């Protein structure tokens, strides 16, 4: 069976540096397919879809709301040609009802152990419109290594520098944060994968740099510490979402190769100031994740928050505005209050205001978003700050003798010759 798996294109945030991470969801899904399925993966962000290339089934994997309208267009094109189309992924689950109008089938939930039935139904002419496994999650032990062999590795570098490969050590989240839909998608129970399987998968990845995409590693202290202990011999360098704020955990994370974390900076408290300092004391850099437009955010509050970010010396910061994605508490509240004025999913980019803020107009919040980006990067550009972040990982790799650029000449031009001296100074 020829199965073409497509990841629709989507525009980057206007202020983000232009590079592409290898998609994780599609290759995790592909690992759940039976051996008799011949899979071709197309990342439309970097490749062109050949609509004339024959396929027995087309799968469209969507992560972001920004991808759904393009995904529908792709599906409509194939279905006009008589090719069956099945949708899956995070944004399929968030936009299931609308997506059904463009699909022969919609798969909701986690795919491990489920795809044999779907493909059997396809072969026997009884493909169902919806396969809903949202509440029938597979045993976490069934989650195997992702099909990274499907990725065209050379597409995922930046100026000759190897970027990160994505891996996950758990599913589900016991937190239920206001703007987040992870509890809906993966359940409110933290489900850690067996550590030996996670470490084996990491060891098999031909890349020294990883991104642990778990919603938060800070959910089970003993599991988190054991994971870090087992990661130490790998000598991988990795980034992640928050690490638990305990000295013994941060120390182990540093030993395990923690490079930097995405840490939400949600106020100007001493707790946040000290949390950032403790990361730094352990040699872990911080990219602040700053969400603007919550109901307590006045113009003055946002400006003070930006000043605070400069004081605590974040390595990087990424600013977004509150975006009410379906199946979040934010969506429920704002919809009930009749404050959402756009349901065009192409506007749900996290850098466009689609609702009426409480203390400022939508236009003013949009201006404050630009103000935040401009103010934080006014003395040192985003590109230069990212350069410094990569210098840090190169230094760590030099110490461990694990540094290996894909293209030394291009990398040297991008990051400077000093990054490649035998002493590892950058």
Image (cartoon, rainbow, N blue to C red):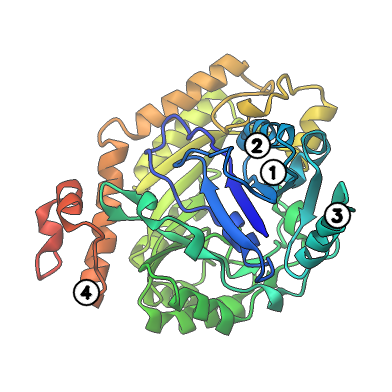
- Which of labels 4 and 1 is toward the front? 1
Q: How many marks?
A: 4
Image height of 228 relative to 43, above or below: below
> Does label 3 or label 4 sit earlier along the sequence?
3
Image height of 422 relative to 415, above or below: below
Marks 4,2: beta carbons within 8 A: no
Which residue is denoted by mark 4 in the rendering?
399
Name the secondary structure under disc 3. strand
Which residue is denoted by mark 2 in the rendering?
71
Image height of 277 relative to 380, above or below: below
Name the secondary structure under disc 1. helix
User: Measuring 67% from the left and 47% from the top, which residue is drawn there?
Assistant: 58
- Which of labels 3 and 2 is toward the front? 2
For the residues marked 4 and 2, what is the alpha-carbon distance in whole angstroms? 44 Å
For the residues marked 3 and 2, what is the alpha-carbon distance in whole angstroms? 20 Å
Which residue is denoted by mark 3 in the rendering?
132
> Does label 4 or label 1 sit earlier along the sequence?
1
Q: Is residue 385 visible?
A: yes
Residue 73 locus on image (x, y percent): 66, 30
Marks 2,1: beta carbons within 8 A: yes
């Amino acid at each position: 069976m020829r199965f073409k798996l497509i990841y629709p294109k989507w525009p980057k945030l206007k202020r983000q540096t232009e590079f592409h991470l290898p998609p994780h969801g599609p290759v995790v899904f592909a690992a759940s397919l039976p051996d008799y399925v011949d899979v071709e993966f197309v990342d439309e962000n970097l490749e062109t879809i050949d609509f004339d290339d024959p396929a027995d089934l087309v799968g469209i994997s969507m992560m972001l709301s920004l991808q759904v309208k393009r995904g529908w267009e792709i599906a409509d094109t194939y279905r006009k040609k008589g090719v069956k189309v099945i949708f899956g992924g995070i944004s399929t689950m968030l936009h299931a009802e609308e997506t059904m109008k463009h699909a022969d089938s919609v798969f909701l939930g986690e795919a491990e152990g489920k795809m044999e039935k779907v493909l059997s139904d396809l072969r026997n002419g009884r493909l169902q419109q919806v396969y809903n496994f949202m509440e029938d999650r597979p045993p976490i032990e069934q989650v195997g290594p992702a099909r990274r062999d499907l990725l065209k590795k050379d597409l995922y570098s930046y100026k000759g520098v190897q970027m990160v490969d994505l891996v996950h050590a758990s599913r589900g989240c016991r937190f239920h944060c206001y703007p987040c839909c992870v509890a809906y998608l993966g359940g409110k129970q933290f489900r850690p994968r067996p550590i030996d399987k996670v470490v084996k998968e990491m060891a098999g990845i031909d890349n020294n740099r990883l991104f642990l995409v778990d919603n938060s590693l800070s959910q089970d202290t003993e599991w988190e510490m054991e994971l870090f202990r087992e990661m130490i011999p790998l000598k991988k360098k990795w980034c992640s979402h928050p690490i638990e704020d305990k000295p013994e955990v941060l120390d182990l994370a540093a030993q395990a190769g923690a490079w930097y974390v995405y840490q939400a900076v949600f106020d100007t408290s001493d707790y946040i100031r000290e949390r950032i300092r403790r990361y730094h004391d352990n040699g872990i850099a911080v990219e602040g994740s700053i969400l603007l437009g919550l109901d307590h955010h006045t113009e003055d509050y946002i400006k003070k928050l930006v000043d605070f970010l400069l004081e605590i010396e974040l390595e990087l910061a990424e600013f977004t505005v509150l975006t009410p994605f379906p199946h979040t508490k934010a969506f429920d509240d704002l919809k009930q209050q009749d404050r959402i004025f756009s349901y065009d999913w192409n506007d749900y980019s996290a850098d466009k205001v689609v609702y009426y803020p409480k203390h400022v107009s939508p236009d003013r919040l949009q201006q404050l978003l630009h103000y935040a980006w401009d103010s934080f990067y006014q003395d040192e550009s985003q590109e230069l700050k990212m350069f410094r972040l990569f210098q840090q990982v190169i230094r760590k790799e030099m110490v461990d003798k694990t540094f290996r650029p894909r293209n030394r000449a291009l990398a040297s031009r991008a990051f400077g010759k000093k990054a490649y001296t035998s002493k590892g100074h950058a």
